[in-house]
Amino acid sequence: MAMAAPPQSMNDMISSTTSARSSTPHSNNFNKQLKNSEENYLNWVRRMGSRNHSNFLDAKNKFQPCKTIKVNKNPKLADFITVKKAIASIPLFNPCRVLISVAPGTYREKIEIPMTMAYVTLEGAGAGKTIIRWDDTADRVGPNGQPLGTYGSATFAVNAPYFVAKNITFKNKAPPPPAGATGKQAVALRISADMAAFINCKFVGAQDTLYDHKGRHYFKNCHIQGSVDFIFGNGLSLYQECHLHAKTKSYGALTAQKRESMLEETGFSL
């Protein structure tokens, strides 16, 4: 038996709802604030890293790095053979842009950039060639005898502002958890600092791959892979020309933004 057609198309319903909402002063004011917030964010993205940026002269944050550190598994071709040691060589309260150039290879390391180590650029030879991987999960016991938690499970964690990553893969190799399992969150990358950018990067994991924790972030031409809710956190981030790949065969959300109030200036734009 043929089903009756709905009284309105989805576009008509959306149009009618939008029109009804926009008729109240409160909603007009909210829409105006939302538009202003979006414009301000896009302006920040355009300015980021440019010579017009207010922090350019103060931080000496030029395009040309003041120092380049080479990482290669062949010690004859490198300053360091691990990414972790290269990062540890950067002084705290670093005043200028430092480029860490990482040669092709898989680097089995767990890395955290402290909040006092700003202006670091991490550049690989290509997302398919340079890979940083680890396999921690939230329920794994850390050095203090307590479970790491989702926050501490990250393969690569950034706590310092003005971080840039290019042409590299961040991977958590923990296996996909069985249905109903707890404590199996396995973060590939956590970004907990302001003014960060990720260009041509790949983020690979099973559960909770990319922890977009807090701060303003820009993702360009990135590949992000996971199961359900694999981009999560409370950051204010723009994902431009990024590919999201869900490995699960069941239905579910791809992102889980943590904003609890519409007054918060956070959100994901994909």
Image (cartoon, rainbow, N blue to C red):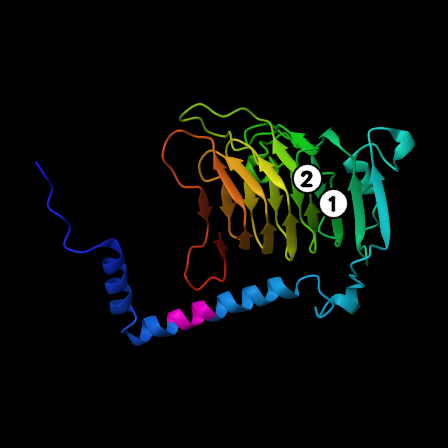
Of the pair 267 and 78, the residue shown nearer to us: 78
The residue carrying pointer 2 sits among few (fewer than 14), some (14 to 19) or many (20 or more) residues within 10 Å by Cα, namely: many
The residue labelled by disc 2 is 168
Q: Is residue 234 left or right of residue 62?
A: left
Residue bounds of the magenta highlight: 30-35
User: Which mark lies nearer to you, 2 or 1?
Assistant: 2
Q: Position of residue 185 (x, y in %)?
A: 52, 33
Q: Position of residue 163 (x, y in %)?
A: 70, 52
Quadrant of the image occupied by residue 70: top right
Q: Residue at x 45, y 40 (%)?
A: 229
Distance from Cα at disc 2 to Cα at disc 1: 8 Å
Q: Position of residue 24 (x, y in %)?
A: 28, 74
The residue labelled by disc 1 is 122
Count the marks: 2
Q: Residue at x 75, y 54 (%)?
A: 119
Quadrant of the image occupied by residue 143: top right
Q: Residue at x 55, y 64 (%)?
A: 41
Q: Amino acid at mark 1?
A: Leu
Q: Check contact, mark 2 vs mark 1: CB within 8 A.
A: yes
Disc nearer the start of the sequence (2/1)? 1
Q: Is residue 154 magenta?
A: no
Quadrant of the image occupied by residue 140: top right
Of the pair 67 and 221, the residue shown nearer to us: 221
Q: Position of residue 250 (x, y in %)?
A: 37, 31
